[in-house]
Image (cartoon, rainbow, N blue to C red):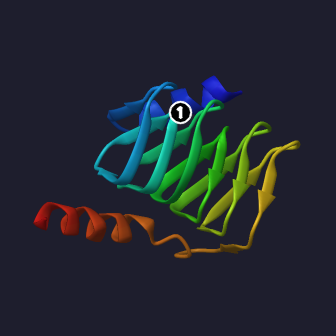
Amino acid sequence: MFEKKEDEITNEGQVESVVGASVKLEGDYSSDGDIFIHGNVTGKVSTKASLSVGETAEVKADIVAKNVMVAGRVEGNIKADEKVDITASGKVHGDIATDDLSIASGAVFTGSCQMGEGSGGAEETAEKEIAEEDKK
């Protein structure tokens, strides 16, 4: 199930970044392409494309993306323009704003959710954050 989701995300856009299982990142991270996280990330992550949190990943960050798939652990708020998918192994502790939410049996979600057309607004938010990073 997890591999299928990664394949679907890969087909949507260009894979730009992979954070390996042994990698630890701290700070704000922004991208135009797909991001795959398998390690530890602390701070803030934003992309105009899709973000995948692998089973081995631990993310303590707010996330802004077009689509988000969580198979690992996320502690932070998620804003997704289109869809958030929490797999059976996924754990999300934070608020979610998105147009479409899927939570598999066995997944953990603690927080509130705002859904509906335009709830995510992530692409515009990601573009603003990336523009601000470019100014620095």
| Rendered residue at 66%/73% (across/down) | 115
- Left or right position of 19 against 90: left
| Rendered residue at 45%/46% (across/down) | 50
| Rendered residue at 62%/23% (across/down) | 3
> In terms of image quadrants, where is residue 17?
top left
| Rendered residue at 46%/72% (across/down) | 121
Residue 35 vertical position relative to residue 102 in the rendered view, above or below: above
* SS for callout 1: helix
Q: Residues within 10 Å of mark 1 (few under 14, many from 20)?
A: few
In percent of width and height, residue 76 lies at: 59, 62
> What number of labels is visible?
1
In percent of width and height, residue 112 lies at: 73, 73
In percent of width and height, residue 62 lies at: 51, 62
Q: Which residue is mark 1?
A: 8
Q: Residue furthest right?
A: 105
Viewport quadrant of the N terminus: top right
Viewport quadrant of the C terminus: bottom left
Residue 97 vertical position relative to residue 62 in the rendered view, above or below: below
- Left or right position of 10 against 68: left
Three-letter amino acid code at disc 1?
A: Glu
- Left or right position of 79 against 87: left
In percent of width and height, residue 43 lies at: 44, 57
Q: Residue furthest left?
A: 135
> In terms of image quadrants, where is residue 124?
bottom left
Tell which of 78 and 44 is nearer to you: 44
